[in-house]
Image (tube, rainbow, N blue to C red):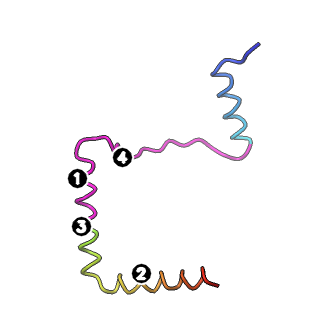
Amino acid sequence: MVASVSERVKKHRAALRAAGLRPIQIWVPDTRRPGFAEECRRQCLVVAKAEAEDRDLADFMDAALADMDDEWQA
């Protein structure tokens, strides 16, 4: 006899739990929503302006990138 979809899902979830996993629900922005792209652009401009005005942050990021380059080349 073939197991129903709900039985297979139940078995699969039980196996995942037995493996130490737990289910969670994640809500993410709806990229299809009107105005989503414009809001992304607005937020990017705010971040870019803040980064351009913060020389210490730029220096920190450059140093972190150089440190990562050193690790990749090692």
The amino acid type found where label 3 is placed reads Val
Count numbered badges in the picture. Answer: 4
Q: Quadrant of the N terminus?
A: top right
Residue 66's tag is: none
Of the two numbered discs 4 and 1 in the rendering, the one whose residue sits closer to the viewer: 1
Image position, residue 63 (x, y; %): 45, 86
**The disc labelled 2 sits on which kind of residue?**
Met
> Can you give x and y, in whole percent of width and height, for residue 68 in the image?
54, 80
Kind of residue at badge 1:
Glu
Going 40% across and 46% down the picture, which residue do you hit?
28
For disc 1, the marked residue is: 38
Q: CA distance from mark 3 to mark 4?
A: 19 Å
37 lies above or below 63: above
Ranked by sequence position, the earlier of labels 3 and 4 is 4
Determine the image quadrant of residue 32.
top left
Q: Earlier in the sequence, mark 3 or mark 2?
A: 3
Spatial distance from mark 4 to mark 1, Cα to Cα? Answer: 13 Å
Seen from this angle, which residue lies furthest top? 1
Q: Are marks 1 and 2 in contact (CB under 8 Å)?
A: no
Mark 2 Cα shell of 10 Å, populated few (<14), some (14-19), many (≥20): few
Residue 70 in the image: state x and y as whole percent. 57, 85
- Which residue is tagged 3? 46
Mark 4 residue type: Pro
Check if mark 3's residue and mark 4's residue have beta carbons within 8 Å: no
- Left or right: 74 as drawn, with respect to 57: right
